Image: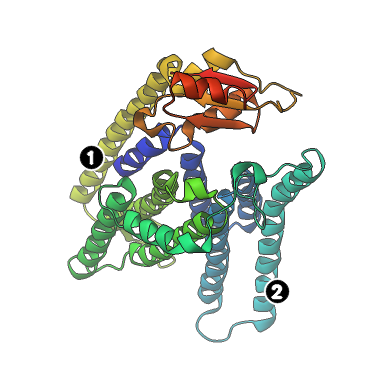
Amino acid sequence: MRALSYLNLTIRINNLLVDFLLPLLAMASAAVSFRYCREKWKLCIIQAILLGFMGIVKNTGVFFAGAAGIYALWMSFYAGWKSRKTESGEEGADKTGSLGKWAKISGLGALMLCGAALPLLAWQRHLDTDLAGFEGKFEMGKTGVEYGAPVGEEFYGQVTRDFLKTSFDLSGRAAQVFFVCLFLAAGAVLYARFRMKRRWRLGYILPAGIVTVILYYVGMLYMYLYFMPAEEALLLAGFERYACSVMTLFAGVLLMGATVDMESSFAVDIDERGAYRAYSSPGAKRRYQYAVLGTVLIGVNFLYSEINGLLSIRADYETSLPGRVEQAVGDRWYENGETDERTYLITASDENGQVSSGEVRYVCRYFLWTPNVETVSSINSEELEMLSREYDCVIVLD
């Protein structure tokens, strides 16, 4: 929980909580898959809702939905295989009934995936009809002209080197959490195996989580090379936020797996089918109760901290960059509002890299509701007078 709050600091600072919402939705999907893997209809309906919502929250939501969908299918088939093995034994299985069960599981899996894809298809149709001509910043297969062309081949090596260097830089929150979780999870698995003589599920979750992180990072690099505007790609704009998003999922699923394993460590099966369990001893029950109480208190503390953080951001809005821009130009993004075709030049100080990172340009384009915004950080009166002839409007923000 502490790791997730630590990662959320970077996401919250960048004012894009949607990057924290996506891994939470994926974790919720994983919990549903674990809980309802034997109740196929419930699993199908709930997953169709969760996966469908993830797919339309943001472009990167397709990745999280895909990872969660693969796990849902795996748990569905695994539960079916385990159920068949329990009912029919090692030998003498009813092949006809078995084929019917697998066909049912496959059909529900296909239905779940189709249901999850419907919101994304509906959204794409909305873009093609109601928002025809709109070019998103990272449109697959094309580049939005208004955002700038992606980096050229001559910069591929530079972007790749900077990307790898930043990925393993231990000063970043994402790298810190990855290696801490890796060592803690590996240590817990080894301790359980050799000291407690138990095989924890965490030993299977950890490699799957590592593979997921690697695939996500490969997708990030591909985005920087082929879809992100060159000006932002050369700066690896948003790297820490994107990385913290997948690390939230990585740390979260490890925590969920460790929780299930630890709960199992306090209990023993009292039924051959595993349907009933009891605490292994009065001492184990007492330790479990104390652990639950401590976890609840820590959770309430972190929840209170998160709420105070959000309230603090809200209280400081007027002095933030979006608040200052709104006070200067207003908010023109209203219902049925038309895009402003005039050209704007924004002059502002580069405090905390707000101009060089493109943050000022992004925020001004949002409130002005126009793509024609350029920014400069330092300018004298002569240059200002000359540039005022080239632009329809010059705004001095700072």
Which sits earlier in the primary sequence, circle 2 or circle 1? 2
Q: Quadrant of the N terminus?
A: top left
From where the camera sits, is residue 215 visible? Answer: no
Residue nearest the viewer, comparing 105 with 273: 105
Task: Return the residue at label 2.
Answer: 100
- Find residue 396 and report its horizontal and vertical position in percent: 49, 18
Name the residue: 30% across, 57% down.
168
Taking the view exactly as shown, the residue that stands out farthest to the bottom is 91
Q: Is residue 316 above or below residue 267?
A: above
| Quadrant of residue 163 within the rendered picture | bottom left
Q: Which mark is residue 290?
A: 1
- Quadrant assignment for the C terminus: top left
Q: Secondary structure at mark 2?
A: helix
Nearer the observer, 383 or 290: 383
Which residue is drawn at the image coordinates 41% and 16% (left, top)?
319
Identity, as a three-letter code, of the amino acid under mark 2: Gly
| Image quadrant assignment for residue 300 | top left
Q: Is residue 363 left or right of residue 189?
A: right
Q: CA distance from mark 2 to mark 1?
A: 47 Å
Whether residue 142 sits left or right of residue 89 in the image: it is right
Residue 55 in the figure: left or right of residue 253: right
Query: What colour scheme does the image use?
Result: rainbow
Q: What amino acid is found at the position of numbered circle 1 in the picture?
A: Tyr
Q: Position of residue 81 (x, y in %)?
A: 55, 73
Query: Mark 1 Cα within 10 Å, few/some/many (few <14, many 20+)?
Result: few
Percent coordinates x, y for residue 133 in the rendering: 77, 43
